[in-house]
Image (spheres, rainbow, N blue to C red):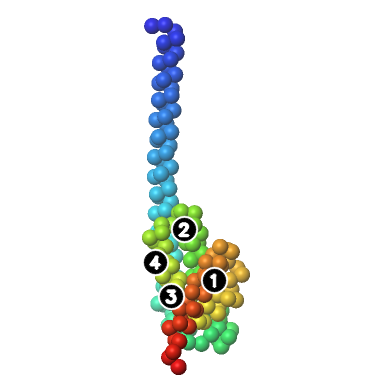
């Protein structure tokens, strides 16, 4: 074997090693992305559970959230209690929305979260709270929630048309 042949074989082997290394790194990155998505889903479930637990543990908070009145009629302590709960809830939705935008949170999981968000926004008092509180959230999330709130408001108005 000549020195040129040995050099060519060494170059081929080095190239194969580089390709195998890149394949391995690609597999590791894919696995890491999957684990990141799973961790995001687990964290979301824990946060949602903790926040919903506040409602089940506090009859006063549950009563406030289900009243038909608007935030203007709440006492200062009532407003503080509901506002803090809603702030936590909407911050959770904001994080999920951001994770979904960047491909960390699966669309299938987002559908359930969006349904819960829509359910919240169907309440006029929560929409009134949102209108006052929206300034502290990310612009993309505000735009998204505003669109949902507008859709729900139109749907509610249409459902009551002709019932007078």
Relative to 82, is 105 on the left or the right?
left
Compare residues 148 and 157 and report the one nearer the observer.
157
Label 3 and label 1: CA atoms lie apart by 14 Å
Percent position of residue 22, x then y: 43, 33
Contact check, label 4 and label 2, Cβ < 8 Å:
no
> In the rendered view, would you say 133 is above or below 14?
below
Label 1 sits on residue: 146
Task: Tell me the element at label 4.
Answer: helix
Percent position of residue 95, x then y: 50, 61
Task: Tell me the element at label 3.
Answer: helix
Label 2 sits on residue: 100
Q: Which residue is drawn at 58% across and 85% down?
A: 72
Q: Which of marks 3 and 2 is nearer the N terminus?
A: 2
Contact check, label 3 and label 2, Cβ < 8 Å:
no
| Residue at the limit of the structure toward the top, as seen here | 2
Q: Which of marks 1 and 2 is nearer the N terminus?
A: 2
Q: Counting other residues with Cα less than 10 Å from the Cα at mark 4, is it few (<14), some (14-19), or many (20 or more)?
A: few
Label 3 sits on residue: 119
Percent position of residue 146, x then y: 54, 71
Q: Residue at x 43, y 57 (%)?
A: 105
> In the rendered view, would you say 135 is above or below 129?
above
Label 4 sits on residue: 112
Task: Tell me the element at label 1.
Answer: helix
Q: Which of marks 1 and 2 is in front?
A: 1
Label 4 and label 1: CA atoms lie apart by 19 Å
């Amino acid at each position: 074997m000549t020195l040129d042949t040995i050099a060519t074989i060494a170059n081929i082997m080095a190239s194969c090693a580089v390709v195998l290394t890149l394949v391995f790194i690609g597999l590791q990155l894919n696995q890491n992305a999957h684990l990141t998505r799973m961790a995001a889903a687990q964290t979301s479930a824990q946060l949602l559970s903790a926040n919903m637990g506040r409602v089940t543990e506090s009859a006063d908070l549950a009563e406030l959230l289900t009243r038909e009145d608007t935030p203007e009629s709440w006492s200062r302590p009532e407003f503080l209690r509901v506002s803090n709960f809603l702030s936590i809830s909407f911050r959770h939705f904001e994080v999920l929305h951001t994770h979904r935008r960047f491909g960390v949170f699966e669309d299938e999981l987002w559908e359930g979260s969006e349904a819960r968000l829509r359910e919240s926004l169907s309440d006029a008092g929560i929409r009134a709270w949102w209108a006052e509180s929206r300034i502290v959230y990310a612009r993309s999330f505000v735009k998204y929630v505003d669109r949902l709130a507008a859709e729900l408001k139109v749907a509610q108005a249409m459902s009551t048309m002709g019932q007078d």
